[in-house]
Image (cartoon, rainbow, N blue to C red):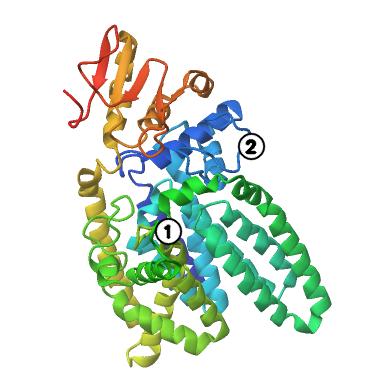
Amino acid sequence: QMKKLCIALAALVFLFLLTRTVKLSLVPPSVYWDEASIGYNAYSILKTGQDETGERLSVHFKAFGEYKLPVYIYSVVPFIKLLGLNEVSVRLPAVVFSLGSLLLIYLIGTRISKKPLVGLLGAFYFTVSPWFFIFSRTGYEATAGVMFYLLSIYLFLVSLSRGYFLIPSLVSLGLSFYSYNAFRILAPILLIVMLAAFTIQHKKRLTKGLGIVFVSVVLFVLMLIPAISFIRSGSITDRLDAVAIKGINLRKWEIALEVGKNYLSHFSKGFLFTKGDVISRSQQPGFGQLVIFDALLLPLGIYFLLKKEKKAGALVVLLLAISFIPASITREAPHALRSIAAVPFISLAFAYGVFFLVEKVKIKKAIIITGIVLLYLGSFEIYLDNFFNNYVKATAQDWQYGYKLIFQNYKDQFGDYDNVLVSDRGIQPYIFALYYLKYDPSDFRREVEYSKPPRSITSLVRGFGKLTLRDIDYYQLPKGSSLVFSHPTDRM
C-alpha cells in the first residue's frame, strides 16, 4: 500500500513539474512589471550587493513605491547566477515554492487524518487547481508566503506532540511575514491560534511548554523588528494608499460594511465558477477559480472535516475562513491573489469531500476515487489546452508584451540614435528597459532621472542614459536623431 502511495505521489510531482515548466519562458508571453522589478533587483544584488536604489541588505524594496518584500527577491539571486537574467530564472523559484506547498499539503493532510490517501488527494487538488495554476509558474511573491505559511502550520502540528518544533514553526511564520503582504495580516492571527492551542496541549508540562513558547515568541518578535521600524517610518502609507479601502466621507460602519461585502464577494458564483478573477494575470478569462464539481465536494468536505476531525477540522476551516480577510480590506475584491492562502485549505476540504462520498455511497472506494480523479484531470486538460493555445494572444497586452518587443527586438538599434523615446502610457516602462537590456545597476543609479512630480503608478522614472520615458509629442522632440516608440493615444 505504501509503495503504491509513493508511486502516486511521485507521479503527482512529475505532473506538477511538467505542467509548471513547459514553455515557462513563453507562457505568459513576457514578465509583468512586478516580475521585472523582482528580477532586476535580484540582478542588482548579484552584481553590486545593492538594490536598484542603492540600498544594501534591503528588507523592504522600494521598487515603484509599494515596497516589495525580500524573501522571493533573494531567492531569485542564485537562479540568475546560474541561468542569467531571464523569465526562467525569475519564475523557477515560484515553481519550487509551489512544489514545496504541494508536499506540505500532503504532509498536513496525512498528519491530520492519519491517512496518507487524504494527503495525496489534497496534493492532487492543489496540482490541478485553476486558482493556483498561473501563480505557480510566474514570479509571484505569494508562492513563497504560502509555502512558509504551510510549513509553519505543519511544524506546529508536529509540536503538539514534540514541543520544541514550535520554534522552527514560528521562524517559518516569520518568513511568510516577509514573503507577501497578505501574510502580514494572517500571520498574527495564526500566531495567536497556535500559541493558545500549544499551551492547552502542553498544560500538563506547563513549565517546559512555557519555556518553548517564550523562546519561540522572542525569535518571532526579533524577526519583526525590521518590519516594525518600516511601519514606524511611515513608508507603508504608500502601499496602503494604493490598495486599502478609504474615502473622505466613509464612516467606520460604512468601511466595515464594505469589508463585509468584499469578503462575501469571494463566494459569488461568478468568481468561483464562471468568470474568476477579472485580472487576467491571475486567471484565464472565462474560467472560474474553482471547477463545477467543487460545488458538491467542498461543502461535503467542510462538513466531514468538522464532524470527523473535531479540533483539527476546526483549525482547517478557521484557516480557510481567515484567508479572505487580506483581500476584503482592499478596494479590489474579489481578488484571487490576495486570498491565495485559501487554496491549500480548499484542497484539504476537497480530500475530505471525496472521503465523505467513499463512506456514504455504496460503491467501491477505488471506483469513486478513480472517477473523481478522472473528472478533475479532464477539467485540468481543458484548462491547460486553453492556457497554452489561447492565453498568450488573449492577454499579451495585460502582460505588457509590447515593452518586451521594444527592448528585445530593437535594442541593437539604440546605439544608432541620439535619443530613444518610449511612451509611458503603459505601467512602469523603465523597469522593462532595465530588465530586458540587463542594464548595469551602477550606471542606472548614476544616470537615473525620476519623474517630477512622482508618478509612482505609471512611470516612476523619467529616463536614464539616452532613454526617455514620457508622453510622446512629435512636435516637441529633442535635438538630434530620435528613435520613437509611441502609443496610439500619444499626440501625433
Is residue 323 among the parts visible in the rendering?
yes
Secondary structure at badge 1 equals loop
Out of 163 and 326, give the one closest to the viewer.
326
Q: Which residue occupies the foreground of this view, 309 or 339?
A: 339
- Dividing the picture into quadrants, the one containing residue 110 is bottom right
Please determine whether, in this image, residue 20 is positioned above or below residue 430: below
Dividing the picture into quadrants, the one containing residue 60 is top right
Q: Is residue 113 something one can see in this rendering?
A: no
Between residues 488 and 406, which one lies in front from this camera angle? 488
The three-letter code of the residue at mark 2 reads Leu
Badge 2 marks a residue whose secondary structure is loop
The picture places residue 3, in percent across and down from the top left corner, at 51, 70
Q: Residue at x 20, y 16 (%)?
A: 475
User: How far is disc 2 from disc 1 in space, using C-alphas?
Assistant: 26 Å
The crowd level at tag 1 (other Cα within 10 Å; few <14, some 14-19, many 20+) is: many
Residue 7 is left or right of residue 213, and the answer is left
Residue drawn at (42%, 42%), measured in percent from left and top? Answer: 34
Image position, residue 484 (x, y; %) = 25, 19
Label drawn at residue 338: 1
Label 2 sits on residue: 57
